[in-house]
Amino acid sequence: MATQIKASVTRSLACDATPPTVRDVSIGGFPFLTQIAFGRFKNIGVTIDGVPTPGPRISSVEAHLKGIHLPVRKMLANDVGEIPVDNVEATVHLDYADVNAFLADQPGDLQINPVDGGKKVEVAGLADVPVLGAQEIGGVIAFEVRDNKLTLIPSEIALHGSINVDIPVPGGLGGLLPAIPIPVGALPFDLTVVEASSDAAGLSLTATAADVVLPETDTTARRCPAPTSSGP
């Protein structure tokens, strides 16, 4: 099962991407022997560390694969093939350091940090304020998840530096501190993000998927070209 899961999470990676680590594969549900006999497993738990994405690196994905269809005759014959899974529920963890490393390459020098043990998240950056020019600006983050996209929405904006003023945010205050999209695509098992929250360590995304198929291991390995020699 660990081999099948690893094939599923690495098949779409670019050749220069470091594959994630699949660990802690466990079989849940009772009774275990009945699950084997009927070829339908109730709950396979797995942790996947270090998932590369188009946006910030994902520190870990803690997933539960529910309703795995694997006939015992295929297991005995070592002819598993594709494995249908009814649904997947997962928690996706992004560390603040990884999110900030991504934001450092975006306009505005934005950074986020937890407040009150992660119950709130603050954002700080630079903005060109009319009359005042470039100013340090910050606010509190709200989360929006829509169409499998995570967006950080700043509110309660305040100016820092030469002045320290709280400013209400009508419509993003004319774009001084706009919404911040965080790309989290290419998740394992084609997971879709449905909710976001924060804690002291980072952001936690709730993600789900239905009718997932784990691929055959021998047909989905990454086909990466062999390195070429630059010598004479």
Image (cartoon, rainbow, N blue to C red):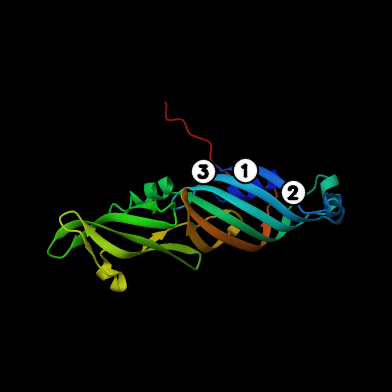
Q: Position of residue 77 (x, y in %)?
A: 85, 45
Residue drawn at (39%, 56%), measured in percent from left and top?
121
Task: Give the residue number, with chain letter if any, for mark 1.
Answer: 22
The Cα–Cα distance between marks 2 and 1, rounded to whole angstroms, is 15 Å
Identify the mark at residue 15; answer none if there is no mark.
Answer: 3
- The crowd level at tag 1 (other Cα within 10 Å; few <14, some 14-19, many 20+) is some
The Cα–Cα distance between marks 3 and 1, rounded to whole angstroms, is 18 Å
Q: Amino acid at mark 3?
A: Cys
Instruction: Say whether residue 107 is visible.
Output: no
The Cα–Cα distance between marks 3 and 2, rounded to whole angstroms, is 31 Å
Q: Earlier in the sequence, mark 3 or mark 1?
A: 3
Q: Nearer the viewer, mark 3 or mark 2?
A: 2
Q: Nearer the viewer, mark 3 or mark 1?
A: 1
Q: Is residue 143 left or right of residue 177?
A: right
Q: Position of residue 147 (x, y in %)?
A: 50, 68
Which image quadrant: the C terminus?
Answer: top left
Task: Give the residue number, with chain letter if any, for mark 2.
Answer: 27
Q: Earlier in the sequence, mark 2 or mark 1?
A: 1
Instruction: Say whether residue 40 is visible.
Output: yes
Label 1: which secondary element: strand
